[in-house]
Image (cartoon, rainbow, N blue to C red):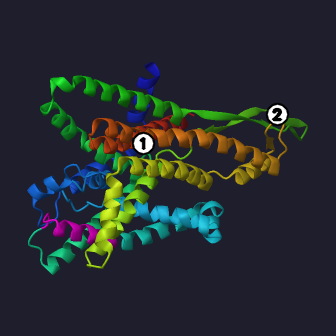
Amino acid sequence: MKTFIHKLKVIFTEPAIRNRVLFVIGALFVFRALAAIPIPGVDHAVLQQFFQNNQFLGLLNIFSGGGLANLSIVMLGVGPFITASIIMQLMTVMSPKMKSLYTEEGEAGRAKFTQYSRMLTLPLAVLQAFGFLSLLQSQGVLVGLSTFAFLTNVILIVGGSMLLMWIGELVTEYGIGNGVSIIIFAGIVAGLPATVSQLAFGFNAAQLPLYVGFALVALAVIYAVVIVTEAERAVPITYAKQSRGGKTYGGTQSYLPLRLNQAGVIPIIFALSILLFPQMILNILASFNINGIDGALAAVQQFSNNVVAYGSVYFVLVFLFTFFYTAVTFDPDSIAKNLQRNGAFIPGIRPGGQTALYLGNVITRLTLIGATFLALIAVLPFGMQQATGITALAIGGTALLIVVNVILDLIRRLDAQVSMREY
């Protein structure tokens, strides 16, 4: 308890950390203000009915940070930027040039890689805005819009998405944590009061065991996510002794921490984006009255409503994306070269290629456990939905995973800032 109070004192008394925290709070205030500004021509009664028990729009609302629920000017949220980031990450696998740019050219290469993601975000935002507005207009949610008003709404929504992407990057640079994840987190948390009040007003004493069961499962999931996220494998490292000027240096021992879940919440976001992308594209094409699109859209919607099939694909995607993102961000060859360059080695393992092979095997075993756990936790709400028939559980489970991971990441980064200032 004393340590916690001491850290809070450092956070609010150290100007550098305090300014970063206040910047995040200010950015989230601006975001929530933007999310409260609706686009013109919305029939809110039809909108509420359209959103009711619609899992597809509920998941999209998570990515928009809650902006889609009232069709605000930031209704797309950071969705286009996330989609662009996924496409660019996939390009690192298909294009050696992109992989070199992302992994070997340092900060300059990563900055250029991020710039490509930003450039790709704009056309994706235009496509998504056009598709959503066409879908909402066909469902009677948007009424009385002329062609000029429709295009004005498209421009407003695209501008809001690009502005939100910029705010997220500012939070990453001048605040604490990943700005995109924090925006999604803020949207989820902002919806909690409405959810709690809805449960309170609709409370039924006969369903008390069900509520208690949900609460216990939620606490168990939170505990398990915290344990797995914080778990790490410590690989021992020894620094070779070196003699310089009659003095001996080195000979110390340390360790290389390898997390059980290197990817964090990213695989969940990636998997959901892939699941939502086909329906999003078909909604856009359906507005052009292309033959066969309505049938394909109906088939995709039927698949989305099939909890077993949808949950199975979701499980596989989360599992694969955990391996994929870990492979992109963790390079055993680079770590082995850095260890060899600094005169460090893993006891019993030859420096260089053998060290890279050893680290690759270790991270593969760790990722297998982490990916399986993350995928199981991700589809657990689908199983509960199948048992209880409550559709919102799947959305709530995904939101819970994102919230817990973002909070843990924020705590870890704040601890790092406090430790750096103390040293």
Task: State the SS at label 2.
Answer: loop
Which of the two labelled residues, at mark 2 and mark 1, occupies the earlier sequence position?
A: 2
| Location of residue 19 (image quadrant) | top left
Whole-angstrom CA distance, mark 2 to mark 1, is 48 Å
Is disc 1 surrounded by few (<14), some (14 to 19) or many (20+) residues within 10 Å?
many
* Residue pictured at 34% horizontal, 43% vertical: 394
The image's mark for residue 251 is: 2
Task: State the SS at label 1.
Answer: helix
User: Which one is nearer the viewer's eye here, 25 or 264?
Assistant: 264
The image's mark for residue 379 is: 1
Res. 311 in view: yes
User: Is 139 within the magenta?
Assistant: yes
Q: Give the range drawn in magenta.
A: 125-142
In the rendered image, which quarter contains the C terminus?
A: top right
Q: Is the magenta stretch mostly helix, strand or loop?
A: helix
What is the residue that sits farthest to the top in this orientation? 1
Instruction: Please name the amino acid that badge 2 sits on.
Output: Gly
Residue 16 rendering spot, x and y as whole percentages: 43, 43
Residue 380 rendering spot, x and y as whole percentages: 41, 38
Judge depth for marks 2 and 1 and give the one in front: 1
Residue 280 rendering spot, x and y as whole percentages: 33, 65
| Location of residue 362 (image quadrant) | top right
